[in-house]
Image: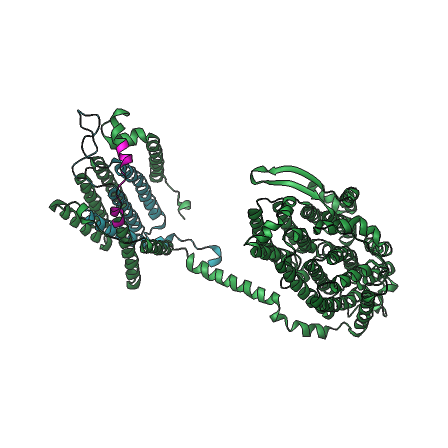
Amino acid sequence: MELLLVLLIGVLYSAGVYLILRRSMVRLLLGIMLLGNATNLLIFLFGNITKGKPPIIKADLKVFEEIYADPVPQALILTAIVISFGLTSFAIVLLKRVYALINSDDLDDLNTPEEEDL
Amino acid sequence: MIPFGKYFRTKWCAVLILLPLSIFCYLLGYIPTVRSGNVAYEFYQWVPSLNINLDLRIDGLSLLFALLISGIGSLIFLYASAYLKGHQYLDRFYAYLCLFMASMLGIVLSNNILLLFIFWELTSISSFFLIGFNNDNPDSRKSALTALSVTGMGGFFLLTGMILIGNIAGTYSISELMNAADVIKNHELYPLVLLLVFIGAFTKSAQFPFHFWLPGAMKAPTPVSAYLHSATMVKAGIFLLARFSPILGNTTAWSYTLMIVGGLTMLYAAIHALFRTDLKSILAYSTISALGVLTFLIGLGTEAALVAAVTFIVVHALYKATLFMTTGIIDHETGTRELTQLGGLRKVLLPVFIAGLLAALSSAGMPLLFGFISKDLIYEATLHADQQLAIYLTAAAFVTNLCLVAAGFMAGIKPFTGSLPQAYEKVHLPYKAMWIPPLVLAFAGLYFGFFPNSAGEQLIAPAVNAMSIAPAAVHLKIWHGFNTVLILSLVTLVTGTAIYYVNKADSRKLAWVQSFQSASPQAIIERLSSGFVKFSDWYTDTMHNGFLRSYLLKIILFAELLLAYELFIGGPIYIDYSKLSAISVYEAINVLILIAAVVLTVTTSSRLTAVVGTSVIGYAICLMFVYYSAPDLAMTQFTIDTLTVVLFVFVLFNLPPFINQANNTIVIRDTVVALGFGIILSVIAIKVLQVPTDISISKFYGDFAYTLAKGKNVVNVILVDFRGFDTMFEIVVLSIAALGVYSLIKLRLTSSEKE
């Protein structure tokens, strides 16, 4: 299964990089989201992936008695997901605002040429 | 002083000479201390954390220079008050001049090489303003810039050299460095240190091949040329060499470099001086030549050579400042400095003529003038060098002196002799403030010529002692006896005079010399700098073209190269199949869905499809978290993904369709780059699998989640308890983003702002 995850990470990174190289702002944003997902998976892979053993202590116990999934990457990813939502939501609204102003989704239309170039 | 600037524009400016004059008198008081071999120290804390303090020392060498700076400074302040009378920016001029004088004194009095460097740069900066003082003249501006860039570049090298010295010796204090001389000389980096310090000194003191800024700097008003470019600033490099000679000197590399560079400079510039017709140019080249002589003598490094060098510093400062000032008067009164047009001015400018004559004779080495003594000392030094070298060194000194004699006569005597052209008959003597300073200097030369020991014991001996390790006894005499030195001196004088008569100032010869301009160091360096500008233009155009994707492409490519290299040298990559977990059907289907969604997102031309594709990816990853024991992650991912889609749809309904302006080449290029990045990251992920996971941290959280924090969901406990502060700041970040989102949605622009 790990190998499938490795493959997925590669695919997600490729797609993310390809999308952020586009001229469209929406694609740029989608690319950033894909890169974020890919990184989350990579961090997830850092811990040993374990099936069906969530890091939750059983109700009648005080410590773990058997093997459990690594909680540290999970905590990191959780933070990352939430923060990236902050970024994405702000970017989406900003995108809408930019579109309202310049009536275009093209990044190149955002370039204001300097005075000497005119 | 600045609020009172307007007062100094008028005649009150003469009051300012009290400043250098009082410094001069104050410093005179140090003569007895220094003469008895003591060193005076002053110490103020400045940046104790970096070990940089205002740490001053007055030994023979600094005192000699400080006296020259303040003494000649007083006269220049007086002279400039008349020369620039009524100039609208006279107050600025004095401000720059004071700044310059202070930094120059700082250089010679510093006992810390970093402090010395700061003052060194300050002289470069203040001289930039002084050279470019006539800032409405493009030539002036260009010269100022050339001077600043050459000396500034040298300063950069010097700083590097000084930091190296400091690292090697463990101290920046000059007194302590003198004790550590052997450590530095035997260190493997010694040649590099030497090179860096030399570049610093050579650029400042206009040594070949960095000499070209000095003639250009003559665009400055004449008082500046007289002060900066003959008596003081250009000697800063010489001072540096003199200061460092007990620390770095007396090695083969030191001596030969200095002798070769100094020798080349003195010959090259002395011969050049003969071809000039502009008075200031002649003086500029003869100054460069004199600086060459000084470098040469310091390189020679024998006791006789050091005595000769110190004496020559004083002699040269006296006569060259005089000649500059007389030139300034001629320029001021007649409006030209062209030697071909001048003549017979002795009839109208008699006191100026006397000053010029005395200075020219002193530079020629006429007996009974101070210049004679220094010339004798120079010959003595070269004759007593190594057997094989003595003949070449003496020959070089002889040729240089010949040219200097002739050049001195051209500048100091030629404009005054012959018949007076009609146009200049109405020329009259300027203010006293203008012709008295050169006369004072000229007579000082005469006085020291008669009583050389008054300078020799008081000033020169302590200065020489500060430069050499063994104490030297200095006795300057008018009469050395009838020997080789005297014959050489006299032959020089006679032949030089002959050259002066034969070599008539002629603009055709000047044109001939200038036809070689394209091969000169100046032209080469200018071509280099324009090439550099072109390269920078090209670099800026390609690397900073203002398109986000082009920056991204470069950054990603670079990251790929670095990562690929790191992976390539990082050892073998293998997969331990026994450790892998099995693949279930659900997972395989999930992965397939995910990959299909990725392909859809990337290839679709519909915006809505792309967003839906992205959310499918998010949900698929969410399922993955569910399989692999991360319920909290799955919940968060699910919520967030839904919210994102909602937000997207909220803005999407009024966006235009995707534009597809990329042609095939770009698509293929980007695909290759993107695939490369994906592959590299996959390889990194495989390498991650190779490394056994360190579970100590997880174990800590697992063991203490309930016992310490009373929580059973370990991930939650980490977030809200163990790393509670992090989470709090995360919430702050989210609130800021929320505020931003809210205000952007609520923002209503007026139609004028939309433009």
> Where, by quadrant of the figure, is residue B293 drawn?
bottom right
Q: Is residue B520 above or below residue B3?
A: below
- Depth check: give the residue in front, B359 or B493: B493
Horizontal relation, residue B262 to residue B487: left or right: left
Q: Residue B294, position in %: x, y?
A: 71, 59
Quadrant in the picture for the N terminus of chain B: top right
Query: Does the segment drawn in magenta span residue B693?
Result: yes
Is residue B211 in view from this perspective?
A: no
Most foreground residue, B96 or B121 = B121
Q: Position of residue B604 (x, y in %)?
A: 22, 54
Tell me, yes or no, if residue B733 can be seen here. yes
Answer left or right for B671 relative to B495: left
The residue nearer to you, when weighing A86 against B157, is B157
What kind of secondary structure does the magenta stretch mostly adopt?
helix
Q: Colour of chain B?
A: green
- Judging from the image, the colouring scheme is by chain
Q: Residue at x 85, y 70 (%)?
A: B418
The relative height of residue B265 versus residue A95 in the rendered view (above or below) is below
- Residue B69 at what x, y percent from top left? 74, 50
Q: Is residue B462 left or right of residue B671?
A: right
* Hue used for the chain lettered A: cyan
Position of residue B155 in the picture relative to residue A94 (left or right):
right
Going by the picture, which residue comes out furthest to the front?
Answer: B387
Q: How many marks?
A: 0
Quarter of the image for residue B149 reads bottom right
Residue located at (25% from left, 41% from top): A47
Span shown in magenta: B686-700
Q: Where is residue B83? Give x, y as percent.
A: 77, 54
- Examine the structure image and report whether residue B283 is included in the region drawn in magenta: no
